[in-house]
Image (tube, helix red, strand yellow):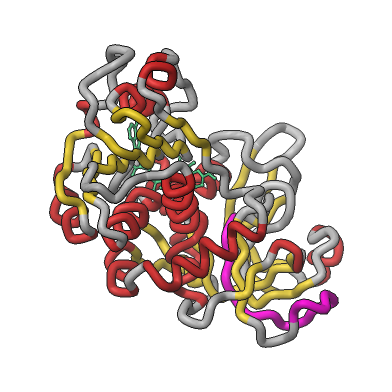
Amino acid sequence: MFKAIFLEKAESNDFTAAVKSLDEALLDEHAGDGDVDVAVEYSTINYKDGLAIANRSPVVRKWPMVAGIDGAGTVTASRNAAFQPGDRVVLNGYGAGETQWGCLSQKARLKGSQLLKLPEGISTRQAAAIGTAGYTAMLCVMMLERHGLARDGGEILVTGAAGGVGSVAISLLAANGYKVVASTGRASEAAYLEELGATEVIDRATLSEPGRPLQKERWAGVVDTVGSATLANACAQTRYRGVVAACGLAQGMDFKATVAPFILRGVVLAGVDSVMCPMEDRVVAWDRLGRELDASRLELISREVGLDEAIGVANDILAGQVRGRTIVDVNR
Ligand code: NDP
């Protein structure tokens, strides 16, 4: 038997999310064509896990489901030549917790083609602390660089700053010498954001209402995790040939903007997806996370809970009440 956060939907549409003890035989039945068995040590609660566990949007597309889009642990058995028992691995996305059983679980049967061997310097606990949110933050940094972000002292705006993606993005950008401005709705987190490396903290209300198509140029680059009017305003405030990496929708999925910033200032709006991101980019992202994300910063960003507490955290993250990242120790 193993414990997992189990999501069920009855024919009546009644939804339940609960920690359950499951028979290992269920993995044969439900874990599809996974070819690597993993003893999960740590998982995490991302925004998308919140949506799935609270049944707030159609994240889960197969029932019943084991939640958890991220997991880190040790291989116990493998029918894939690339993995051996004892390998330390991490899984991010690829439909885990959505279309295939995920990692808020003590055991997972996963596809080797979707697993990444952890770089030496990253423990399974740190891998969960980083999780999809942290690895997406690195993908955003890589996207800004790919589009020629200059380290000329121009300011980089990070929205949703006190959240998971935002906290890691600030740490990474500051470690790379960029001047980071953090946008948050939680003034009480200003000291935390400055400790991560933000040089200025602004109130997210200054960005959240619809604004003019072109505004005073300020940002050399943007990491946007909230979408909606905030993303439109961020584009309208981006400097000539600046780059905006858009990865999130915490404010909303809508995007009512004009083409003015793109055709008059040459602003680049670059989308970032972590779920189906090709393995070669993941390898680069995780390698860089191992080298560029300071371990003490990561500790500051994260807190740890057990599997039983994770369902509560899922609701808190949707309410915007979680700071940074939450590690889930699936064995406590
Ligand atoms: P978190 O909940 O940890 O952070 C989101 C932050 O957004 C909150 O902490 C809050 O920051 C801010 N926020 C919340 N509600 C609003 C609002 N109504 N208006 C403006 N800001 C708001 O989530 P994550 O960091 O894990 O994820 C951030 C977003 O990125 C989510 O939408 C998620 O779905 C998306 N995402 C996308 C990925 C991809 O592959 N494209 C991968 C990972 C995440 P503050 O309190 O500082 O204002």
Magenta highlight: main SS: strand
Residue 170 located left or right of residue 81: left
Q: Nearer the viewer, residue 305 or 205?
A: 205
Along the viewing direction, whichever of 221 and 98 lies nearer the viewer: 221
Residue plotted at (74% across, 84% down): 84
Q: Position of residue 159 (x, y in %)?
A: 32, 39
Residue 14: quarter of image: top right
Where is residue 81 shown, x and y percent of the image? 82, 79
Q: Using residue 72 as the reference point, say whether residue 183 is left or right of it.
A: left
Residue 296 visible in the current orientation? yes
Residue 303: horizontal and vertical position, in percent? 34, 66
Q: Quadrant of ligand 1?
A: top left
**Camera-side residue: 207 or 72?**
207
| Residue at horizontal 75 percent and vertical 64 percent from the top | 113
Q: In this figure, what is the number of numbered marks?
A: 0
Q: Which quarter of the rendered picture does the N terminus lie within?
A: bottom right
Residue 258 to residue 132: above or below? above
311 horizontally vs 4: left or right: left
| Magenta span includes 75 | yes
Q: Which residues are magenta?
A: 69-83
Q: Is residue 188 magenta?
A: no
* Up-down relation of residue 210 to residue 84 (above or below): above
| Residue positioned 70% across, 68% down in the render | 108
Q: Nearer the viewer, residue 170 or 150?
A: 150
Q: Residue at x 49, y 60 (%)?
A: 131
Residue 83 falls in image quadrant? bottom right
Q: Is residue 19 visible?
A: no
Q: Position of residue 20 (x, y in %)?
A: 63, 63
